[in-house]
Image (tube, helix red, strand yellow):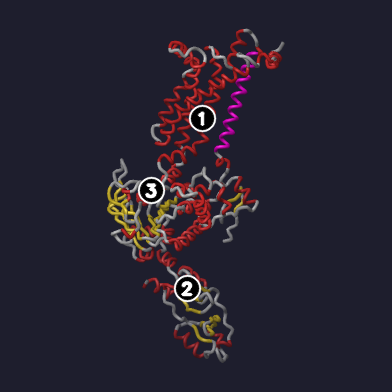
Amino acid sequence: MIEQAVTDPHGSAAIRLVGVEKRFPGATEPAVTDLHLDIPEGQLCVFVGPSGCGKTTTLKMINRLVEPTAGEIHVLGTEIRSVKRPQLRRQIGYVIQQIGLFPHKTIAENIATVPKLLKWDRARVRERVDELVELVGLDREMLRRYPAELSGGQQQRVGVARALAADPPILLMDEPYSAVDPVVRGRLQDELLDLQRRLRKTIVMVTHDIDEAIKLGDQVVIFETGGIIAQSGAPDDLLARPASPFVESFLGNERGLKRLALLTVADITLTDGLVVDVSAAPSEALALMTAKASDWVGVRDGDRLLGWVWSSDLEGIVRVGDATPKRFRSAVGPTTSLREVLDAIVNSRTRVAVVLDDTDRYLGMITVDELSEGIGSS
Amino acid sequence: MGALEETWQFFTTSDNWWGNRGIAQRTWVHVQVSALSLVVAALLAGPPAILFGHFRRGGTLAVAVVNLGRAVPSFGVLALVLPLSIQFGFGLGFWPTVVPLVLLGIPPIFANTYTGVRSADPRVVEAARAMGLTRRQTLTQVELRLATPLIITGLRVSAVQIIATATLGALVGLSALGSFITEGLATFDDGRMIAGGLLVAILAIGTEIAFTITERVLTPWSRVGGQGPTRRRRLRRGEDSPEPGEVTGPNVKVELGL
């Protein structure tokens, strides 16, 4: 049996690979070469790389579907060869493309696979199946059906429910979303992130889709042919500081945009922006516009943002509030991604994104300059 | 009197139904010899076919070797076996008939069982192992279950061939349905001969139907179609909701609203 991590002399790594090598019989080059990797507990770690780079082989060595030819693998502090394969695997959830469901078993039977192997009593199994159906957002009515009666997205949810059935501390996912169409894939990814926020499992996922890796991973490991780690780190680190031309080309174009997609408004320092109060005199507003070389200015009333006015709107009035402010077309919130902020900026006439909180309180403005400074300093 | 009338007369004569040489007794013997041959063939062919399929190695060669058996005529085997059977005390009739029938039954069972186990989706089998099923559990709960339709088909084909060929038993003194044919031939009794043929055909067809029903009962999952009629019907009735982007019918694309 796998011991809990407290007995692990190596700290909080849930999965630790030490000098792991895999040579397939008949192959001249090893599929995985002297691999050292720590996967911390509770993190979602994504293996990504071109096909044939050894990422799937590495994943399958963790639950002994593939046996390494050298090195050691520790799962929660236990060397995995000291545990019988079925025992090891019953504590590690495994999700593959939807095709991995048992076609001859109903959805309920599929989900109950591991609990039944662990000889849970019937009532407990039924209770757990109901719980999981709820957790992954399936309809209870589906339990009696066969996998072929479900859509691709539904099958994938069943796959996740089946992997989580015995509440394993670790989840392995082998290209789980490669067989569903992009719209469903995006939604399943969001569901996984939501699930992970609640469950905090140690998840290792393999994908060939770098965007998926960046979106989902706490830690992204980029593999090169031969099972060599080209670079490993948080997605933002990889995008900000690719270690080699290979990593750079693998991350692809639009690295800046991808970083913007990762960061949110909360990650940058907000400034008050080009704004005056409704009670301000037009001369005060014009002075601010001249200083910022702008032909418009925002108008606020306390912590409410009323809109914006052209400099020409300020002629012949006593206070700024007498002009009728035009509304800003769109506002962003503190959790909006910077990529959406950029979109809001380029779509607005004033070339700024306005930040409001949930209660429409004005928090600040973001310009393109602030955006690029923001990601430069993070 | 025409052949049809003679056949009718044969069936409507109650003496032909009962007694040692009657239809009832001979049908029973025919069923016995066929069933025993099928069981023995399945016991001989099944286990090795399952192992070849499970290990996914050497099976194609094995199937080729087993299929060579199909080239050996049952009549020839019967002729070879008869003197041996007499010499070793198994006598005439039943036992010499079983041997060629077993040999006849082996190839379809072997080929289908092997193919069925071998063609279990490797990803499903890997998922089973990854879930922590032992090798034996993977075999019994996944591979064999998925192979069930093909295995039953193999048994069905063998059973029908065995039933049809068991008529040869009459040549070595087995008093079964084939005897009506040989007797009819010998006595120029067309009615008796045709009746014998008809009875064998009815038994074979009945067996075929029984196996088909068995297969349907044992494989409820094979009647549900993926994006096929079952799901489409549910969607139409509003019992299920489509995924965004899912194609739910022949030319119907659900609007994404994007």
Q: CA distance from mark 3 to mark 2?
A: 46 Å
Q: Which residue in the structure is indicated by mark 1? A: B154
- Residues B242 and A292: in front is B242
Instruction: Give coordinates of residue A196: x percent, y percent.
Output: 44, 61
Instruction: Give coordinates of residue B18: x percent, y percent.
Output: 64, 16
**Disc number for residue B255:** none
**Callout 3: SS:** helix
Q: Amino acid at mark 3?
A: Gln
Residue at screen point 70% across, 16% down: B12
Badge 1 and badge 2 both on one subunit: no
The span picked out in magenta is B192-218
The answer to whether residue B222 is left or right of residue A367 is right
The answer to whether residue B198 is left or right of residue A88 is right
* Mark 3 or mark 2, whichever is nearer to me: 3
Q: Amino acid at mark 1?
A: Gly
Tell me the quadrant of the picture where the N terminus of chain B can be found: top right
Position of residue A310 relative to residue B211, above or below, is: below
**Disc number for residue A87:** 3
Q: Amino acid at mark 2?
A: Pro
**Callout 1: SS:** helix
* Chain containing the residue with disc 3: A
Q: CA distance from mark 1 to mark 2?
A: 66 Å
* N-terminal-most mark, 3 or 2: 3
Residue at screen point 31% across, 43% down: A27
